[in-house]
Image: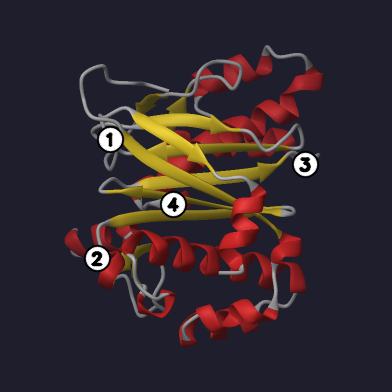
Amino acid sequence: MTLGSTLTPLTSTVWWAHTSDAADRLLRLLDGTERARNDRFRHQADRDRHLLGRAMARLALARLAQCPPEEVTFDLVCRSCEEKARAGADPGEREPHGKPVPSGPAGGWEVSVSHSGEWVVLAVAEGAPVGVDVERVSAARDLDGLVGYTLADAERSVWDALPPSERTAAFFGYWARKEALLKATGLGLSGGLRRVAVSPPHAEARLVSWSGGGGPEAAWLTDLDRGADYRAALAVLTDRPVRTVVRTHGDTVALLRS
């Protein structure tokens, strides 16, 4: 986590929801496209996670923008497709996709949503791109293969030197930090996890390097605590110090009932 010393702090607020908080009454907060997507999920757990992410985002932004949640809208922006178009490539016809960017009364705010296991997390910031990621620590069938896909060479050397008992949790720590940064840029996983090098999970979170194009001019990065079974990280693309406000689960329950 890199902090400036003289710049005015920027605030990023983090909300956590448990999958048990999902309720049909929240469907009223989704627009037609979001409801259609929610219906396409085959498993109830996936529907619940998607519903909570969209509902939390709309309610939190409505509170900040002081408007009814129905007036909060989103534009979907895919930076990868935009870069392909600028390079003269045809991205083809696709359903609208990409990072949700608030519009309407909530324009100027930035949001990011992630979910894994039983938890959904929302991050909100004003005037600076934000990315959040949560990963449940779980045994992977092909951890070495995932590490080869995820870690840059220097990161792999550090990871290989860890005791075997620490490697799984460390891997998900790396992943959460990298994906938070990629989501903040709008590139998402298509940006390539190995292009982004971050500090080791046992060290203070920071962006070390970004190979190739598309990297941010400045980035603030920190870990979020969701217990021993999860790894989570928050990234804000700013050179200002960032004050992180983490809402309690009770705050989220009250928000979803508002």
Which residue is tagged 3? Answer: 140
User: Which residue is at 78% across, 41% downward?
Assistant: 138
Task: Give the alpha-carbon distance from disc 2 to disc 4, as whole Å.
Answer: 19 Å
Counting from the top left corner in percent of width and height, residue 123 is at 47, 49
Residue type marked 1: Thr
Task: Give the alpha-carbon distance from disc 3 to disc 1, as whole Å.
Answer: 34 Å
Residue closest to the eye, 63 or 120? 63
Question: On the picture, is 22 further left or further right than 103?
Answer: right
Q: Tag 4, which secondary structure?
A: helix
Identify the image quadrant of the C terminus. bottom right
Are the residues at dot 2 and dot 1 in contact (C-beta closer than 8 Å)? no
Q: Nearer the N terminus, badge 2 or badge 1?
A: 2
Query: Residue 254 is drawn in which quadrant?
Result: bottom right
Residue closest to the eye, 71 or 80? 71
Counting from the top left corner in percent of width and height, residue 33 is at 47, 84
Q: Tag 3, which secondary structure?
A: loop
Query: Residue 208 is drawn in which quadrant?
Result: top left
Q: Which mark is residue 76?
A: none
Query: Residue 115 is drawn in which quadrant?
Result: bottom right
Identify the image quadrant of the N terminus. top left
Counting from the top left corner in percent of width and height, residue 144 is at 70, 33
Residue type marked 4: Gly
Residue closest to the eye, 17 or 75? 17
Label 2 Cα neighbours within 10 Å, binned few <14 / some 14-19 / many ≥20? few
Residue type marked 3: Ala
Which residue is tagged 2? Answer: 89
Which residue is tagged 4? Answer: 188
Q: Nearer the N terminus, badge 4 or badge 3?
A: 3
Label 1 Cα neighbours within 10 Å, binned few <14 / some 14-19 / many ≥20? many
Residue closest to the eye, 2 or 158? 2
